[in-house]
Image: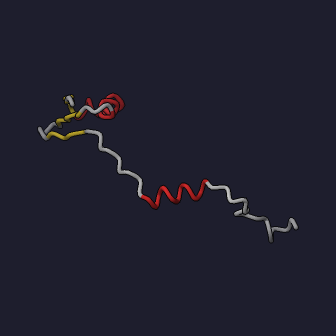
Amino acid sequence: MSAMQATARNFTRKFPIYRRAARAGQTVRVRDRDGVTYVFAREEADAPSLADVAGHLLGSVNSGVRKKSLAGYGSD
């Protein structure tokens, strides 16, 4: 993993370039006018929970039962 250096002004101007670099695994160190250094890096996403996966699966199963009806809207 390599590191890139940038000033705060340059970082805001060329943010898409630094974002692509962070996505590729590089670390971007940003130094502001006061000499404070910030680190911009990619963070790994959390794995989906079992409840999220089950909810997605249940929504994609075709049970044959209509979930919505137009009953009561004047079109009998």
The N terminus lies in quadrant: top left
Residue at x 51%, y 59% (from the top left corner): 54
Q: Position of residue 64 (x, y in %)?
A: 72, 59
Is 66 above or below relative to 37?
below
Q: Residue furthest bottom?
A: 72
Res 6 → quadrant: top left
Can residue 7 be seen here? The reply is yes
Residue 14 seen in this snapshot: no
In this picture, residue 30 sits left or right of residue 65: left
Instruction: Please state the horizontal and vertical placement of residue 58, each as a whole percent of the image.
Output: 58, 59
- Is residue 25 rendered to the left or right of residue 64? left
Pick out the residue farthest to the left. Answer: 35
Q: How is the image coloured?
A: secondary structure
In this picture, residue 39 sits left or right of residue 35: right
Count the marks: how many? 0
Q: Is residue 54 left or right of residue 20?
A: right
Judging depth in this view, the residue of 11 and 62 nearest the camera is 62
Name which residue lies at 47% across and 58% down: 52
Closest to the observer, 56 or 9: 56
Find residue 12 and report its image quarter.
top left
Residue closest to the far right:
76
Query: Which quarter shows the C terminus?
Result: bottom right
Q: Residue at x 38, y 51 (%)?
A: 47
Please report the residue visible at 17 percent of the width from the left and 35 percent of the height from the top. 31
Looking at the picture, how far across and down is residue 7, in whole percent? 20, 31
Tell me where residue 65 appears, x and y as whole percent. 72, 63
Quadrant of residue 28 within the rendered picture:
top left
From what the image shows, is residue 11 above or below residue 76? above
